Amino acid sequence: MSLLPVAEAQARLLVKVRPVADYETVTLSDASRRVLATDLPARLTQPPFNASAMDGYAIRHADLSAPNTSLKVIGVSAAGHAFDGSVAEGEAVRIFTGAPLPEGADSVLLQEDVEATGDGSIRSTYPVRAGQHMRRRGQDFVDGEIVLPHGTVMDFTRLTVAAAMNHATLTVFRRPLVAILATGDELLPPGAIPGPSQILASSTFGIAALARQAGADILDLGIAPDDSAAITAAVERARDAGADVIVTLGGASVGDHDLVQATLVAAGMQLDFWRIAMRPGKPLMVGSLGLAHVLGLPGNPVSSLVCGILFLEPLIRKLASLPPIQRAATSLTATPLAANNQRQDYLRATLSRSPDGGWSAEPFGKQDSSMMKIFAQADCLIVRPPNAPAMPAGMPCPILLLRPDLQG
Ligand SMILES: Nc1nc2c(c(=O)[nH]1)N[C@H]1C(S)=C(S)[C@@H](COP(=O)(O)OP(=O)(O)OC[C@H]3O[C@@H](n4cnc5c(N)ncnc54)[C@H](O)[C@@H]3O)O[C@H]1N2
Ligand code: MOO
């Protein structure tokens, strides 16, 4: 059976994805990294009044045309406590940052540039520019202006302006729901005491974390034994919960106990493709069950996680209306690389900075897809395209960063 090239498999998966259109209302505190489902207009004008940008004195610029003019201080305007009056010729009002500029005033003297002349008057010791240190009403945004268009990904700057525009809640797209099912008679949850021939179901946790980081909610379906009825029952739970993606772990290959594909097809899954020209991850299976996308990930934990990065993460990002996570980078290889066969290879490697500031990637000597420790120690995957020729040390090669938010 021929193997599908990775890029073709990714394209075939993503072309069918329709972003989640349902939306929900969340408070601002829960809105970080959520995607706006509507345009967000300002509900007020900011600043709502001409305001002082400095601590000092509100004055009329025209009053200072003659040198050494002294101005009588007639009151105080503080943030939250406007001066209830206006500034007439020869007058000034003590003012603080953020306070409304009184009627009649058009400029602010910095208090450091002022000296007292006795009897409650002041004089500027520095040249004054008309309109200085004043924030004009509406210079930030005006009532009704669409400041954040729909599709905006909320973050610290956008949450701040949303709050300033007087939105306590936001309408955001629902997060995609990813249901995860581990399969295998040999599996136990972490914390259990494994008997002979048992192991712990580990990749559920990595896949759940990857999916959450990508913007999904998780439904953990636990562990199903190698039994069609148990797998079918778990998948029914995912469908009842409205999962957008059903991820199975293990049982994807060709062994007598690899029941996942046949069971899902019997449950109504349309198989799209199976078996990819990649290492690890060859037995990856992709299909759909009703409206849900189905990803059958291989059981070896490294294979599951590499398929998670290459297929599940982009699928979630598109469902969630989020931009792809940029993992692709280039590094020099610290060691020679062997010629590759027809499967695109993803070598677990550590990264260090080379003297010119670029990356240098050193692959681990053994690359077995069951070895979780070296994957946890790795910083990147070196991508070896199909049939790539042998490469000496010091040559540039494509890599995928495992922690792009920490490795920029
Ligand atoms: N004759 C062939 N045998 C295999 C082929 C093949 O093409 N022909 N492909 C191999 C490749 S490549 C992979 S990858 C594995 C994956 O196969 P499965 O998806 O069927 O995985 P399992 O057999 O169920 O498990 C493999 C391995 O992983 C452990 N496992 C399973 N689930 C988990 C989990 N949730 N957490 C941690 N570890 C898990 C399981 O105990 C096995 O040790 O097939 C090769 N065989
Ligand atoms: O593809 Mo398997 O994932 O090589 O171990």
Image (tube, rainbow, N blue to C red):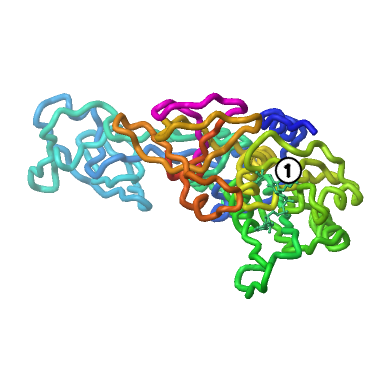
Residue 232 screen position, x and y as percent: 86, 58
Residue 315 screen position, x and y as percent: 68, 40
Residue 311 appears left or right of 167: right
* Residue 380 visible in the current orientation: yes
Q: What stretch is highlighted in magenta?
A: 385-401
Residue type at numbered disc 1: Pro
* Residue 170 visible in the current orientation: no
Q: Which of 381 and 33 is in front in this view?
A: 381
Quadrant of the rendering where the C terminus is positioned: top left
- Asked if the residue at label 1 sits under 8 Å from ligand 1, the reply is yes
* Count of numbered marks: 1
Local secondary structure at mark 1? loop
Residue 295 appears left or right of 137: right
Residue 8 screen position, x and y as percent: 71, 28
Q: Which of 293 and 250 is in front in this view?
A: 250
Residue 305 vertical position relative to residue 113 in the rendered view, above or below: below
Prevailing secondary structure class for the magenta stretch in the rendered image = loop
Residue 81 vertical position relative to residue 274 in the rendered view, above or below: below
Which quadrant of the figure has residue 361?
top left
Label 1, on which residue?
Answer: 283
Q: Which residue is drawn at 39% across and 34% down?
A: 359
Q: Nearer the viewer, residue 244 or 34?
A: 244
Q: Which of 400 and 175 is in front in this view?
A: 400
Residue 323 screen position, x and y as percent: 59, 35
Quadrant of the rendering where the N terminus is positioned: top right
Residue 226 vertical position relative to residue 116 in the rendered view, above or below: below
Q: Does the magenta stretch include residue 270?
A: no
Q: Which residue is drawn at 15% across and 28% down?
A: 127
Q: Does the magenta stretch include residue 392?
A: yes
Q: Which residue is drawn at 63% across and 75% down?
A: 193
Crowding at dot 1, Cα within 10 Å, few <14 / some 14-19 / many 20+, comes out as many
Q: Residue at x 84, y 63 (%)?
A: 230
